[in-house]
Image (cartoon, rainbow, N blue to C red):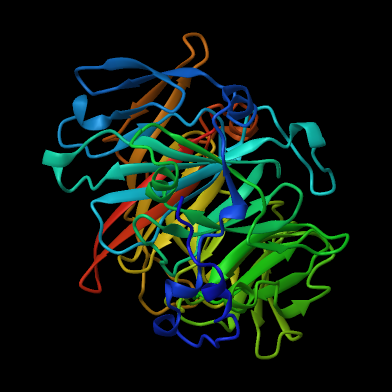
């Protein structure tokens, strides 16, 4: 077995990184002690999600019903002509999903994590039973759907087994360190114990090469220890957001915001704190986001009381509070081009954009008929995608005109798809081609009380770059089970 020279990586730890071009992947190396290949089936099964199989119906006139076993997938184009997309059966409740940023490759990777079952629930101050902390992060691979001649079903390439508990959120670091037969990427994961762990994930080909194996089946590797661990005494981090490629902003259960310098942390191999802002709120911070994807100065936050605030890190203790929605949870994401932020208002189940921190100035972009769980944007395309607990995924353009005092903009949304669930047959149904409703019928409080087995909880986008220009975007949404 040949190992990568680790000492050469640490010899450059003190190197100062000021921009993306000065961040070479040569001083981020795979450390073999951080990972251990697992072949014991009993040990593997302790970490995997519990749901074994599901039934999924797809198609318009020719409706097909397939039974997907755990870690199987299906191609939507087999039942719906010209529909490029896939359905993965991950086997558990999904709360984290992200596409690996990498140079143009025919194979794309996506990381998925969450709870092992749909019945697990954890509070901010409750920790998991140590015997129930077995879990796994799934790494799926699939071919670029723009080349149908080489199209094949997505496969579970690798499972990262761990004993850190359920996953609240995860994200790949935007700077690619992808090297075939070596490194896959830097993965940031937030767990239910309120700790953020950073992993330098090995490429599946690297593990196969070290094992001298040509087997293309799923690789199971256990995380012995993370590369970095961000933790706070007597405080849980419950949300995070990456700013540009250097700063990691985190909201905590005690109403504070901490910003870590993740680049310096990686180079020095220890957590480096940039700013700690205490007393932002008397209740937990449920969401943080950066205003600009190329700027590390402005952060938006929202707390459990629904208060939206702006923080200028040049003067971090001068906070600007904008408006309040009186909601315990509100998805929010910056537009990426310093044009404000997009948020969900579950009082009327709408997605809105705001630029001036005033509720009356918000522009409605999309309307659901259920609580909205997540929002993702593509600043390169001015597109926002949102998903709700009742299985609806909507795509809408982001308006960029100047905001007036009472802006009036006609919505231009598109229902990407709807996921239904039949409790009698225990079968999911994928439906697309539906027209958006300009006026959603009133359903009272009943819509917030149904058993949302088909809830869409996370949405994300994959951006493929060619010659420094964005050429393709795809969206993936996740169901609860």
Q: Report x, y in % for residue 177.
A: 42, 66
Query: Which residue is located at x 45 percent, y 55 percent?
Result: 2
Instruction: Answer above or below: position of 8 versus 416.
Output: below
Left or right: 114, with 438 as reference point = right
Q: Is residue 31 left or right of residue 326?
A: left
Q: Quadrant of residue 100?
A: bottom left
Q: Quadrant of residue 297?
A: bottom right
Question: How many numbered marks appear?
Answer: 0
From this viewpoint, is residue 325 visible?
no
Picture residue at 32% right of the left edge, 69% below the top: 380
Nearest the viewer among 36 and 286 is 36
| Residue 144 in view (yes/no) | yes
Q: Picture coordinates of residue 240 (x, y %)?
A: 63, 62
Quadrant of the rendered image containing residue 174: bottom left
* 431 left or right, relative to 260: left
**Residue farthest along the top direction in this orientation:** 424
Nearest the viewer among 64 and 155 is 155
Q: Is residue 37 left or right of residue 394?
A: right
* Foreground pick, 349 / 312: 312
Task: State whether residue 315 is above or below residue 241.
Answer: below
Which residue is rendered at x = 44% and y = 41% of the image?
Answer: 211
- Which residue is the extreme one toward the right? 234
Give the image location of residue 285, x and y in percent.
73, 62
Q: Position of residue 447 (x, y in %)?
A: 58, 31
């Amino acid at each position: 077995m040949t190992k990568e020279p680790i000492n050469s990586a640490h010899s450059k730890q003190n190197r100062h990184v000021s921009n993306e071009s000065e961040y070479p992947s040569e001083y981020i190396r795979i450390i073999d002690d951080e990972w251990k290949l697992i072949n014991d089936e009993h040990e593997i099964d302790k970490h995997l999600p519990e749901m074994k199989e599901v039934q999924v119906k797809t198609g318009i006139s020719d409706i097909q019903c397939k039974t997907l076993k755990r870690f199987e997938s299906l191609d939507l184009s087999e039942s719906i002509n010209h529909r490029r997309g896939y359905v993965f059966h991950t086997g558990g409740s999904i709360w984290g999903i992200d596409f690996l940023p990498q140079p143009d490759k025919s194979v794309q990777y996506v990381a998925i994590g969450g709870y092992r079952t749909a019945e697990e629930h954890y509070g901010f101050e409750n920790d998991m039973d140590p015997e129930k902390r077995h879990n796994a992060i799934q790494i799926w691979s699939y071919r670029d759907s723009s080349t149908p001649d080489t199209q094949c079903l997505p496969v579970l390439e690798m499972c990262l087994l761990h004993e850190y508990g359920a996953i609240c959120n995860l994200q790949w670091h935007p700077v690619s360190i992808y090297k075939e037969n070596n490194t896959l990427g830097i993965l940031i994961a937030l767990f239910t114990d309120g700790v953020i762990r950073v992993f330098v994930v090995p490429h599946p080909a690297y593990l196969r090469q070290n094992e001298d194996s040509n087997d293309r089946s799923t690789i199971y590797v256990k995380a012995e220890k993370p590369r970095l661990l961000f933790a706070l005494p007597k405080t849980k981090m419950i949300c995070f957001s990456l700013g540009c490629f250097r700063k990691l902003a985190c909201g905590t259960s005690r109403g504070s915001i901490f910003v870590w310098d993740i680049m310096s942390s990686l180079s020095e191999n220890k957590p480096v704190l940039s700013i700690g802002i205490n007393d932002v709120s008397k209740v937990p911070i449920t969401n943080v986001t950066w205003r600009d994807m190329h700027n590390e100065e402005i952060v938006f936050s929202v707390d459990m009381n629904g208060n939206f605030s702006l923080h200028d890190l040049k003067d971090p203790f001068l906070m600007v509070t904008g408006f309040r929605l009186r909601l315990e949870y509100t998805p929010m994401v910056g537009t990426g081009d310093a044009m404000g932020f997009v948020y969900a208002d579950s009082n009327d189940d709408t997605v809105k954009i705001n630029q001036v921190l005033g509720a009356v100035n918000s522009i409605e972009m999309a309307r659901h008929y259920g609580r909205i769980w997540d929002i993702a944007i593509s600043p390169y395309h001015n597109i926002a995608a949102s998903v709700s607990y009742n299985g609806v995924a909507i795509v809408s353009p982001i308006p960029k005109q100047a905001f007036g005092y009472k802006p009036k903009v006609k919505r231009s949304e598109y229902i990407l798809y709807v996921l239904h669930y039949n409790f009698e047959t225990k079968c999911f149904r994928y439906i697309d081609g539906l027209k958006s409703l300009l006026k959603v019928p009133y359903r009272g409080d009943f819509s917030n009380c149904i058993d949302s087995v088909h809830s869409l909880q996370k949405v994300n986008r994959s951006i493929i770059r060619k010659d420094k220009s964005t050429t393709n975007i795809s969206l993936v949404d996740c169901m609860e089970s």
